[in-house]
Image (cartoon, helix red, strand yellow):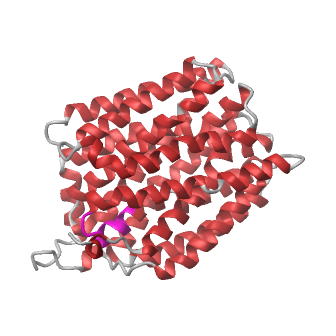
Amino acid sequence: MDKAATRIPGSLTTAMILQFAVGGAVFPFVSLYLRDQGLSFPEISRIFLCGASTLLLFPFLWGMLADRFIPLNRLFLLLNALAVLALWTLGQASGYLGLLAAYTFFHAVYNPTPMLINALCFPHLRNPSEQFGPLRAWGSIGWILPSLPIFIWLAISANQSLRFTLDLGCGLAVVAAVGAFFLPHTPPGARQPRGDGSPPLGYWPATRRLLANPDYRAILLSFFLVASSFAVYAYYSSPRLEDLGMSRAWIGPVQSGGVVLEVFLFRWRTRLIGRGSYATPILVGCAALLLRQLLFAWCGNLSILAASYLLVGVVVVFYHIGVSILVDRIASPEVRSTGQTLLVLCGSGLGPMFANWGVGWITHWFGPGLSPVFMFGAVLAFLAGLVIWTRRASL
């Protein structure tokens, strides 16, 4: 295939960078920001639980809109505009209830976008299994880009206020909203004829057929468990590192180590795992997440814990992207956006809800120490791998 046929549209690369940069500015620091506002771990876990609860509805809503009514490129304009408003509100909020409402709003409009951008990219790639890895690597670069200005801010700021992270995320969301005007047109899949010229199946029949697929149901269950475990990593690693003596100025750069590895792994992913079963890379991702959680549960050495962020890069490249590509293969064109966003509903919605409920219960009964929390995350990662193992023959 010639270079022209394999060239990735520049607007997709830019959108991938910006969409992940918004999350990279906010999520690694939001636990510390909430703790700076005087909230306890049980209160923080309830805020995260409420944020995750929005993903029981909104991913399905956004996916249905993209598949039936609104071109996906225009939906990104709407979601990023709402994210700007949500982050501005979060920066202005004070007190438990105000912070809860603002964070929940942000979670509802931002969190589906990392999966929706996959659905946006796949139709515009000639060979998704080969091209998506290098394209998704730009998302990893986007995630770590905010680390440098945040590091500089924390290094020179007298009070080390994390309000800067919200302002930076807000500015990046503004740029992403403007960039949505330049995305390739992606009409709703339910309105398009199939590749063989036959009429579309229809949104609801296609959705029922997707949900009846036992492989897809196994993926949803596994994604729920991995998202639960990943929520423990995402929200409680920064406090754990700070409690062990790491300066918060270094938390962003340390977390970037895994993301830098992602960039290289994405480009070598196909060569590393071959072109056989989808189950193999997904299981590799589960094993990496299990090991990473065990290290945070049992080890207090900051150097080892910093190095363990490399395992997070393995989880993202092999598990999350493996699952996303597999869902694109399983789902029919009429429900490709819905297939991706249902992962967010069952995974990033129910998963973090369950995880934060569990963390609230664990810290209530076992105290503020976070070692039992990471053991909880390890169990979840093991169960996720077990689910995939049972379906490995068909995947």
**In-image side of 251 versus 393 (left or right):** right
Q: Position of residue 178 (x, y in %)?
A: 57, 78
Q: Position of residue 118 (x, y in %)?
A: 38, 62
> Which residue is at 26% across, 41% downward?
273
> Which residue is at 18% across, 58% downward?
209
**In-image side of 195 versus 339 (left or right):** left
* Viewer-nearest residue: 165 or 149: 149
Where is the N terminus found, in terms of image quarters? bottom left
Check residue 86 for magenta coloring.
no
Q: Position of residue 353 (x, y in %)?
A: 51, 42
Q: Position of residue 378 (x, y in %)?
A: 45, 26
> Which residue is at 51% across, 56% downward?
111
* Viewer-nearest residue: 238 or 157: 157
Q: Is residue 57 visible?
A: no
> How many numbered markers are drawn?
0
Where is the C terminus found, in terms of image quarters? top left
* Furthest residue in direction front, as rendered: 2
Residue 191: name its quadrant.
bottom left
Q: Is residue 145 visible?
A: yes
* Viewer-nearest residue: 2 or 60: 2
Residue 194: name its quadrant.
bottom left
Depicted 146 relative to depicted 242: above or below: below
Q: For the magenta stretch, what is the residue range? A: 118-127
Residue 287: name its quadrant.
top left
**In-image side of 195 versus 184 (left or right):** left
Depicted 314 relative to depicted 52: above or below: above
Determine the main secondary structure of the stretch shown in magenta: helix
> Which residue is at 23% across, 68% downward?
333
